[in-house]
Amino acid sequence: MPLSINVLAQQKAAKPVFVKIFTSEGNIKVILYDDTPEHKFNFLQLVKFNKYNGLLFHRVKKDFMIQGGDPDSKDADSTKILGRNSIGFNLPAEIRFPEHFHKRGALAAARTDNPKKESSGSQFYIVTGKIVTDKELDHFEQNINRLLTPPTPLKYTEEQRKIYKTFGGTPHLDGNYSVFGEVVQGFDVLERIQNIPTDANDRPKKDVVILKMKVVKK
């Protein structure tokens, strides 16, 4: 089971927390959100105890996302099917839409299909995405409203639309997965990773290794 964060949740918001992801293709720095405390605390515990060291970005889909955190990916044979394992527990969903959305660089928790939309205890993804049109955003708004219980007429703000139309993202995931941070540095590395050739299972033909992660200052 994940460690309790009751005491943490009662404390005032601390200074922003940044994590640097050191990879074989370069480094990516992310900031973790305070209003997704379960995911923030869990991610920091995994970083603290070096649980990501040596794991792979085992699933890469150009113009969509890069995904890592499967414990089975460490030293995995090139023929091994990855993405089916986690650290042994799920996290309760912390879907803060529309505050947090799937813009390019969004850091979110992967999950299996489950009614509570609980997150994997260790697998995560970073959005690469693509440019989206207003017509597509109108369509995604309708889908999001159907997902919410009770149905709520949420709309993308003008600023969110501008980001999706100029910076890109994956809005079809909004309202369905827990976004708990975002990239603040290393978009060139993100681009490099998403362009590595992959096999039929979306695994990079050249291993993209998470060398280590470390909490860093801004």
Image (cartoon, rainbow, N blue to C red):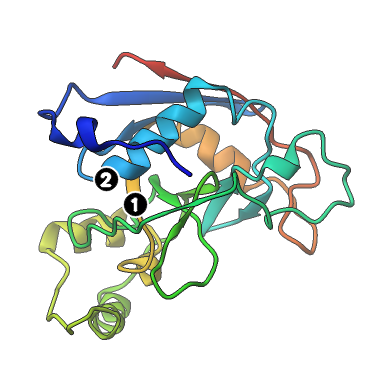
Specify the amino acid type for callout 1: Val
Circles 2 and 1: CB distance less than 8 Å?
yes
Q: Position of residue 94 (x, y in %)?
A: 29, 55
Specify the amino acid type for callout 2: Thr
Q: In this picture, is 18 found above or below 188?
A: above
Q: Position of residue 182 (x, y in %)?
A: 34, 40
Figure quadrant of the C terminus: top left
What distance separates the C-alpha of mark 2 from that of mark 1? 8 Å
Picture quarter containing residue 77? Answer: top right
Regarding residue 29, the answer to whether it shows in the image is no
Which residue corresponds to the image point at 48% horizontal and 44% vertical from the top-left?
A: 1
Which residue corresponds to the image point at 54% horizontal and 44% vertical from the top-left?
A: 122
Q: Going by the picture, which residue comes out furthest to the top? A: 217
Picture quarter containing residue 217? Answer: top left
From the viewer's side, name the closer residue of 113 and 158: 113
Describe residue 131's horizontal placement relative to residue 97 as left or right: right
Q: Helix or strand or loop: what does disc 1 sit on?
A: strand
Q: Residues within 10 Å of mark 1 (few under 14, many from 20)?
A: many
From the viewer's side, name the closer residue of 19 and 166: 19
From the viewer's side, name the closer residue of 212 and 204: 212
Question: Which residue position holds label 1?
Answer: 179
Question: Which residue position holds label 2?
Answer: 36
Regarding residue 107, the answer to whether it shows in the image is yes
Describe residue 60's horizontal placement relative to residue 6 as left or right: right
Q: Position of residue 169 (x, y in %)?
A: 38, 58
Which residue corresponds to the image point at 82% horizontal and 40% vertical from the top-left?
A: 76
From the viewer's side, name the closer residue of 208 and 94: 94
Q: In this picture, is 173 found above or below 79?
A: below
Q: Residues within 10 Å of mark 2 (few under 14, many from 20)?
A: some
